[in-house]
Amino acid sequence: MPELPEVEVVRRGLVSWVRGRTIQGVEVVDPRSVRRHALGAADFIGNLEGATVTDVVRRGKFLWLPLLDAYLSQDPGTSGTPVRPAVALMAHLGMSGQLLMQDRDVPDEKHLKVRIRLSPADGKPEQLRFVDQRIFGGLFVTAMVPTDDGGPGGLAESPLPLIAEEASHIARDPLDPAFSFDLFYRRLRKRKTGLKRALLDQGLVSGIGNIYADEALWRARLHYARPTETLRRGEAERVIDSAREVMLDALAAGGTSFDSLYVNVNGASGYFDRSLNAYGRDGQPCKRCAAAGVHATIRREQFMNRSSHTCPVCQPRPRNGRW
């Protein structure tokens, strides 16, 4: 599943292509990909056509396009009159969702689900296509609500204190300029759980998935089972700094692609997987230990129906560890 760096690569690509353009037409090729839009495909289309995309925003792994002059229909049980709140097109990439910019003469992708036709712009493709092989992702129109701290909703070109309603429950991520380490640390110390489990808790800190949790913990020289209530402030700072660094490195490499399912808006794969130090390297030498002349092998262990990758030498398991 795409993690924060992969979604941020998509956001950065999208904003240069779609910002300021009007949606002139929408075709839902497969209604399953708009199933999260409660009032159905026709209402989804009606809400989008004629609206202008004002930005592309990301918080954690959530991505949305704020819209100008868009209508969001009310529940028909309350009133048939459309309302005009702050509205956004929410994109949930799931396991294999892709947002691709394509010229209209480019043949449809095999797993094309939704086609959005944008107003003409010099040198820019006309269509935004949502492609999804496994159909775990989808698009829907949602209201935007004020942020609980009054800060920007997420990373954007023109940040506003609004957030897509479906993303309002998640915490800020380490790349968010409004991320508060003090708030994160206070909440972390109250968790009484294992460190990696806490990092994967999107209500505590968003955007860190399995791959980057392993990489951040390796950089921070901490084991995934370290009890959160025993973490000193400096150790917690080291973890967040490591998570931020590894995600920035991944961004510079275009994200992490293990197969053709993750690509950016131009259809190109990232190559950060070539720089991984822990994740997926079980049975291989620990690069840090090898550089110090110490023999150590990355170990893979079962964790929450997933896997964790650690070095037993430079990331020793705590005696009172928690999963």
Image (spheres, rainbow, N blue to C red):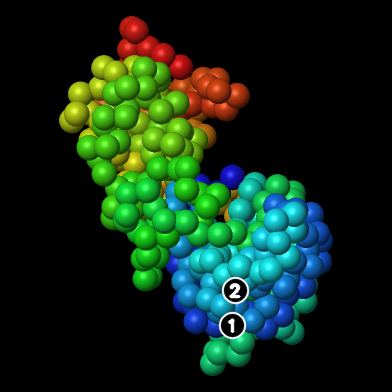
Q: Which of the 4 image quarters holds residue 116?
A: bottom right
Task: Please tell me whether mark 2 sits on a helix, a strand or a loop.
Answer: loop
Which is in the foreground here, disc 1 or disc 2? 2
- Residue 297 in picture, x, y percent from top left: 42, 23
- Residue 189 in picture, x, y percent from top left: 29, 23
Confirm whether residue 278 shows in the render. Answer: no
- Horizontal relation, residue 16 to residue 43: left or right: left
- Horizontal relation, residue 310 to residue 7: left or right: left
Confirm whether residue 230 shows in the render. Answer: yes
Residue at the extreme left of the image, as rendered: 234
Neighbourhood count class around disc 2 (C-alpha, 10 Å): few under 14, some 14–19, many 20 upward: many
Mark 1 or mark 2, which has the lower sequence index?
A: 1
User: What residue is rendered at 41% in x and 14% in y?
Assistant: 322
- Name the kind of residue labelled 2 in the image: Ala
Vertical arrangement, residue 264 with respect to residue 171, above or below? below
User: What residue is rendered at 46% in x and 33% in y?
Assistant: 200
Judging depth in this view, the residue of 282 and 70 nearest the camera is: 70
User: What residue is rendered at 19% in x and 29% in y?
Assistant: 233
- Residue 2 in picture, x, y percent from top left: 55, 49
- Residue 236 in picture, x, y percent from top left: 25, 31
Q: Which mark is residue 11?
A: none
From the image, which quarter does the N terminus lie in?
Answer: top right
User: What residue is rendered at 59% in x and 64% in y?
Assistant: 89
Circle 2 residue:
70
Circle 1 residue:
22
- Name the kind of residue labelled 1 in the image: Thr
